[in-house]
Image: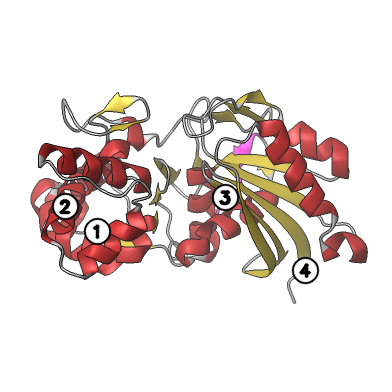
Amino acid sequence: MDEVSVRIGVDIGGTKCALSCGACTAGAIEILHREEFETRGLPWRQVLAEYARRIARLPAFREGRPASVGVSCGGPLDSRRGVVLSPPNLPGWDRVPVVEYFAERFDIPVRLQNDANACAYAEWKFGAGRGTRNMVFMTFGTGLGAGLILDGRLYTGTNDNAGEIGHIRLAETGPAGYGKAGSAEGFCSGAGLVKLARLRAAERGMRLPDDFSARDLFARVDAGDAFCLSVFAESARHLATILAYTIDILNPEMIVLGGVFMRQSARFLREIAPLVEREALAASRSVCRIVPAGLSENVGDYAALAVAGMEEQDGKRDECD
């Protein structure tokens, strides 16, 4: 029987944060507890203090010390030094020593990883990508990024910036994402979808509600709203372009799509399939499956818990068995 360890997962997002506690083995994660809280605009010290307060009252600390803490956060960051480095979706988080903060308070190992990398690792170990050696995970939330599993290993690049596909410019003009107008993040992320809808609405002399969200857009798509269907189709076209680039450059056997994509996965896949078929290199496209996240919209919780179990071996990331 696999040894069970109890881990803590910290998933830091641009609008909300989640805390999870899980029972983890080499082949599975069972989430025992989960909670989330709003963080939009809060200073980092206040966010981390709230995490520390919530972690301290978890049953896991009353019943015995957890094995480790995993922190998943948008980049850029330095996973080796455990420092968050000014993510565009976390204003004011400049050189924040996240690992040191939690390690000093709880005296257990703490590990930090880019959220897209963390999700890729979780899907590879426990979800849709299990058994693959070359897999890409794309996360669509406040931002847009990709985590890469290449030759059976998590690949993070020279300084943890591999997979920042949201920064790729797809058009000269368009909604801004990652500080760049017309970027993939501007067209395809959850926040980008809302920006795209507002931009196209303004061009037509329309006004959307101040609290209009990606969830609202998807609801209107389901209801057959012509305007929202056109926005959805435009976003899907740009997503197909990014997928084709990824297939041509990396030749993966699987691309896993998560985040807000999950809310309309069947419709997105129908929309993008013929476009990817047309744009991607045929030999590479024929061996690549594009699938929704196997860990569902909760992939962020699994990701943070998976990060808690990551090990460095001879300077290399954890490899597949």
Residue 242 vs 180, above or below: the answer is below
- The secondary structure that most of the magenta stretch takes on is loop
Q: Give the residue displayed 51% in from the left and 59% down from the top.
A: 299
Of mark 2 and mark 4, the one earlier in the sequence is 4
Gap in angstroms between the C-alphas marked 1 and 3: 22 Å
User: Mark 2 near mark 4, Cβ–Cβ under 8 Å?
Assistant: no
Instruction: Specify few, some or many for label 4: CA neighbours under 10 Å numbering under 14, 14-19, or 20 or more.
Output: few
Image location (x, y in percent) of residue 173:
17, 27
Instruction: Specify few, some or many for label 2: CA neighbours under 10 Å numbering under 14, 14-19, or 20 or more.
Output: few
> In the rendered image, which residue does mark 3 sit on?
319
164 left or right, relative to 251: right
Residue flagged by tag 4: what amino acid is it? Glu
Image location (x, y in percent) of residue 111:
70, 42
Instruction: Specify few, some or many for label 1: CA neighbours under 10 Å numbering under 14, 14-19, or 20 or more.
Output: few
Q: Give the residue displayed 78% in from the left and 32% down from the top.
A: 100
Tag 1's secondary structure? loop
Of mark 1 and mark 4, the one earlier in the sequence is 4
The mark closer to the camera, 2 or 4, is 4
Of mark 1 and mark 3, the one earlier in the sequence is 1
**Of the pair 319 and 195, the residue shown nearer to us:** 195
Residue 213 vs 34, above or below: the answer is above
Gap in angstroms between the C-alphas marked 1 and 4: 36 Å
> In the rendered image, which residue does mark 2 sit on?
283
Q: Give the residue displayed 42% in from the left and 48% down from the top.
A: 141
Gap in angstroms between the C-alphas marked 3 and 2: 27 Å
Position of the N terminus, as image quadrant, is bottom right
Span of residues in magenta? 315-321
**Of the pair 249 and 223, the residue shown nearer to us:** 223
Image location (x, y in percent) of residue 300:
54, 55
Residue flagged by tag 3: what amino acid is it? Glu
> In the rendered image, which residue does mark 4 sit on?
3
User: Mark 1 near mark 2, Cβ–Cβ under 8 Å?
Assistant: yes
